[in-house]
Amino acid sequence: MDVLAPIEIRIPKENNDMARLREHAEWVRSRLADDTGAATAEYAIATMAAVGFAGLLVAIMRSDEVRGILTDLIRRALTVNG
C-alpha cells in the first residue's frame, strides 16, 4: 500500500433524518444567538436594585439619630451668623 495514495472518502447521501437534524441544529443556533429581551431583563434587575437601595435609605432616614443630624445640618446651614 502506497502511503501517498489518495484516500477515498465516502459521504453518505443526506437522508430525511439528517435533513431534520440539520434544520433543528439551525433552529437551536438561531435561538441561542437571539438576545431579544436581554435589555428588558437588565432594566428589571437595575430597577430592583434601586428599589432595594431606596428601601434601605428610608429605613436609615427614619432613625431618630439620622433625623437629628440632618435637622441640625439644615438648621446650621440656614442660620446666618451676623
Image (cartoon, grey):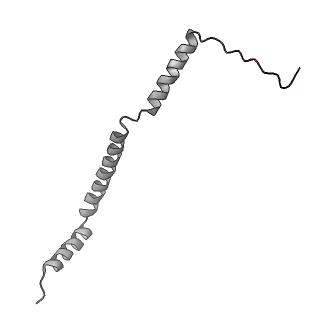
Give the residue drawn at x 55%, y 9%: 16
Residue interval drawn in magenta? 1-10
Give x and y (percent) for residue 35: 40, 36
Is 18 placed above or below 75 here? above
Q: Is residue 7 magenta?
A: yes
Image-quadrant location for residue 59? bottom left
Give x and y (percent) for residue 53: 31, 55
Residue placed most toward the observer, 10 or 5:
5
Residue placed most toward the observer, 70 or 49:
49
Give x and y (percent) for residue 80: 12, 84
Give the residue drawn at x 28%, y 62%: 60
Is 35 placed above or below 64 here? above
Q: Is 9 on the left or on the right of 55, as rendered?
A: right
Give x and y (percent) for residue 11: 67, 15
Is 60 placed above or below 44 here? below
Residue extending farthest to the right is 1
Q: Is 15 on the left or on the right of 50, as rendered?
A: right
Q: Is residue 28 magenta?
A: no
Give the residue drawn at x 49%, y 28%: 29
